[in-house]
Image (cartoon, rainbow, N blue to C red):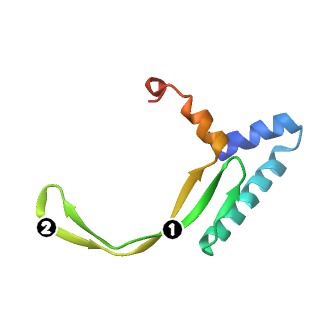
Amino acid sequence: MTKRDLAIRIAQQTKLNQNDVMKVIQMSLDNIVSEVAAGRNVEFRNFGVYEVVVRKPRIGRNPNAPKDTVEIPERVVVKFKPGKIMEAKVGKINPKKIK
């Protein structure tokens, strides 16, 4: 599903203008990005949490030349942790039906 697909679906369900729905979706995403970029977590009950975490520095190895090591520096990443409802619904999916 793309952002446009979501806007079309919501517009059909609510009878609102597609462009207005698209603007609301974009503003929502912009605000989520702003909060996460400021180092704050964003939580949507029953959906999930966008969490800002720090990955520790570590040593990486080239699988083709295992003797060669590379230092991977500490960095900040975004982690998504699904909520209970999403976790339950995804857990019901038959793994053989996923491409």
Dot 2 amino acid type: Asp
Kind of residue sitting beneath label 1: Val
Which sits in the foreground, 39 or 33? 39
Discs 1/2, front: 1
Q: Which dot marks residue 40? A: none
Between discs 1 and 2, the one toward the N terminus? 1
Which quarter of the rendered picture does the C terminus lie within? top left
- Which labelled disc corresponds to residue 53? 1
Front one among 39 and 7: 39
Contact (Cβ within 8 Å) of mark 1 with mark 2: no
| Residue under the image location 47 percent in, 29 percent down | 98
Q: Secondary structure at mark 2?
A: strand
Q: Is residue 4 above or below residue 62?
A: above
Separation of marks 1 and 2 at Cα, in angstroms: 28 Å
> Image quarter for residue 49?
bottom right
Residue 68 marker: 2
Q: Quadrant of the N terminus?
A: top right
Q: Residues within 10 Å of mark 1 (few under 14, many from 20)?
A: some
Give the vertical position of 22 relative to 66 (above or below).
Answer: above
Locate residue 44 relative to residue 18 in the image: left or right. Answer: left
Q: Residue at x 34, y 73 (%)?
A: 57
Q: Please tell me which residue is depicted at 39% across the width and 75% down the height of the picture.
A: 74
